[in-house]
Amino acid sequence: MKQGSPKILVVFPIILTIATAIIMGLILLISNIFAVSGMFLVLAITLGALVSVALNLIILTMIDPILAESIKKNHRLIRFESLSHPLMLRMSYEAPGTFHHVINVSILAQKAAKAIGADALLTRVASYYHDLGKLDAPTLYIENQSGEEIPKTYDSENIASQAQKIISHVKNGVQIASENHLPIEIIEMIKEHHGTTSVLFFYEMAKERKLKVKRTDLKYEGPTPTTRESAILMLADSVEAATRSVPFLTQELFREIVENTFSDKIREKQLKNSGMSEHDIKTVKDSLLETLDSIYHQRILRS
């Protein structure tokens, strides 16, 4: 069975088989208890078969629209699943650091989605495209910089200006995704993947230098994640970015990065509209730690 195919395709025939067996079993039990005639038994079995067919048709009528919508949704997503899609190829050429980042995020996010029973296919595909907006100016972003592009001095005006350029990648990503007819679910996740958080690099710099910068100048417009898949993307994106910026890694540092990321997002109420339970959050956290270890195992310093 292909990944992402509805579980109902497996469960539904089993349910119908059990229901039919129960009906036939009851008929045979009643016939034995009351010692009914052969003719009555034939009629009862015929009636039972008709009831089973009717039950099948009723359930199929109820399930069919859901099944059709699920298949249609998966088909739309699969069109954008390939790394050979023109947008992904463009990212690999023009923003190779971002391309590497989104691949790692997709691995982290997909496994976390599976761990809590969320839509793993949607989460993986949305992870591929969440930073599309960086294609407008790839060297603005540290993962695509060689060093000379990074400004050496900052003042309040410069920080606010640079932060707004970074923040614009969300709006630019939505525009590029819309122009290329990506599914609406992916576009919404692009829009939500930073929620209403601040651009931490510039916010911390402003605090260190005691510069007067409006917090609103450093904040993404949002909205905050409205689905579990969108929340997982936000968390995986933040964790991967933080991990990638650290030259020497240990498992203790992994845990610290993940714990701090989750604490920050919860404190800033970024997950409140996502539908994630406390159990989901813990499971996602454990999944990210496990996957980080497998992705970066060659960089981990072990005692």
Image (cartoon, helix red, strand yellow):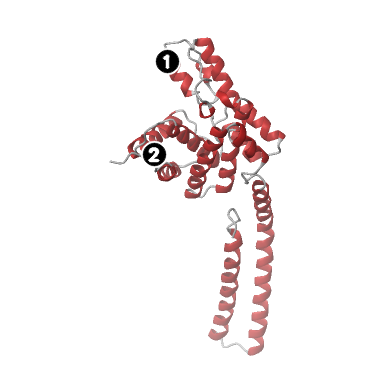
- Badge 2 crowding class, 10 Å Cα cut-off, few under 14, some 14 to 19, many 20 or more, is few
Position in image of residue 161 (x %, y %): 56, 15
Give the mark nearest the N terminus, 1 or 2.
Answer: 1
Give the alpha-carbon distance from disc 1 to disc 2, as whole Å. 31 Å
Q: Quadrant of the C terminus?
A: top left
Nearer to me, 190 or 104: 104
Q: Which residue is mark 1?
A: 207
Taking the image as drawn, is residue 295 in sight? yes
Which circle marks residue 299 in the picture? 2
Q: Quadrant of the N terminus?
A: bottom right
The mark closer to the camera, 1 or 2, is 2
Tags 1 and 2 in contact by the CB under 8 Å rule?
A: no
Amino acid under disc 2: Arg
| Residue ranking furthest to the left | 303
* Number of marks in picture: 2
Taking the image as drawn, is residue 119 in sight? no
For mark 1, give the secondary structure: helix
Give the residue drawn at x 34%, y 40%.
Answer: 251
Give the residue drawn at x 69%, y 60%.
Answer: 61
Position in image of residue 12 (x %, y %): 60, 63
Amino acid under disc 1: Lys
Residue 221 lies in quadrant: top right
Which circle marks residue 252 in the picture? none
Give the residue drawn at x 39%, y 34%.
Answer: 257
Position in image of residue 239 (x %, y %): 45, 35
